[in-house]
Image (tube, grey):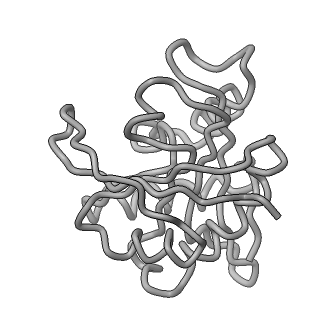
Amino acid sequence: MKLIEPTAEYTNQIRTYRNEFLESGSSTDGTGTLRKCEDPQEWIEYSYKCKSPDTVPQGLVPATQYMLVREEDRKIVGMIQIRHYFNDYLEKYGGHIGYSTAPSERRKGYAEMMLKMALPKCRELGMDKVLITCMKDNEGSRRTILKNGGIYESTVYEPNSGIYLERYWIDLAE
C-alpha cells in the first residue's frame, strides 16, 4: 500500500473510485471536489491548486490530497485530505483530516492504515495535534480514529447538514 498525491497516471482509477461512490450513494469525504468533477484531470489540477496558499480558492484553506493505492492492482482503495490549518468552519465541524474508503473495500482496515500513514505528514506540516470529526452514527470511522489515538472531546450539531459530529483530537507529539 502506498499513500500518494493524485497524478494523471491514475486517471482511470480516479474515475472508477468516483463512480463507485456515485453508484452506491456514499459520501465522498476527504476527496475535495471529486464528486462534482466528471473529468479526473480537472480534479487533479484542482487538488494541486488547493495545496498552496497562493492558489487555493477563496474561502478554503490549503490542503494536501492523497490516495491510498493498493500496489499489486493499482486500485485506489481510499482517499484522505489533510487541511493545513483551520478556517472557522473546519475548526468547529470539519477538522484537519477527512477521509473515505471505497465502498467495495470497507471493513478491511484501509481507513485505519491510511490515517496512520497520514499522521506523519501532519507532523511535517508543523502540527502538534489534529482534529478529526465523524458523524455520531459512523461506528467505523469512530473506531478508525480511536485506533489511531483519538481522544473524544465533544459532540457538535452542524446546522447546514443537520447532523451531529463527534470531535476527536490526536496528539502528534513523539
- Spot occupied by residue 60 in the image (x, y as percentages of width and height): 53, 22
Q: Is residue 161 above or below residue 174?
A: above
Q: Is residue 161 above or below residue 53?
A: below
Task: Give the residue at x 80% y 41%.
Answer: 126
- Spot occupied by residue 166 in the image (x, y as percentages of width and height): 33, 56
Which of the pair 28/155 is nearer the observer? 155
Task: Give the residue at x 67% y 31%.
Answer: 45
Q: Is residue 70 above or below residue 30?
A: below
Total marks in image:
0
Task: Give the residue at x 74% y 64%.
Answer: 3
- Spot occupied by residue 6 in the image (x, y as percentages of width and height): 70, 49
- Left or right of 27 on screen, residue 37: right
- Spot occupied by residue 117 in the image (x, y as percentages of width and height): 72, 67
Which of the pair 80/92 is nearer the observer? 92
- Left or right of 103 on screen, residue 136: left
Q: Quadrant of residue 12?
A: bottom right
Q: Quadrant of residue 46?
A: top right
Q: Is residue 24 above or below residue 162?
A: below
Q: Quadrant of residue 120?
A: bottom right
Q: Considering the image in quadrants, where does the N terminus appear? A: bottom right
Q: Residue furthest left?
A: 162
Q: Considering the image in quadrants, where does the C terminus appear? A: bottom right
Which of the pair 26/95 is nearer the observer? 95
Task: Give the residue at x 40% y 35%.
Answer: 92
Which of the pair 170/120 is nearer the observer? 170
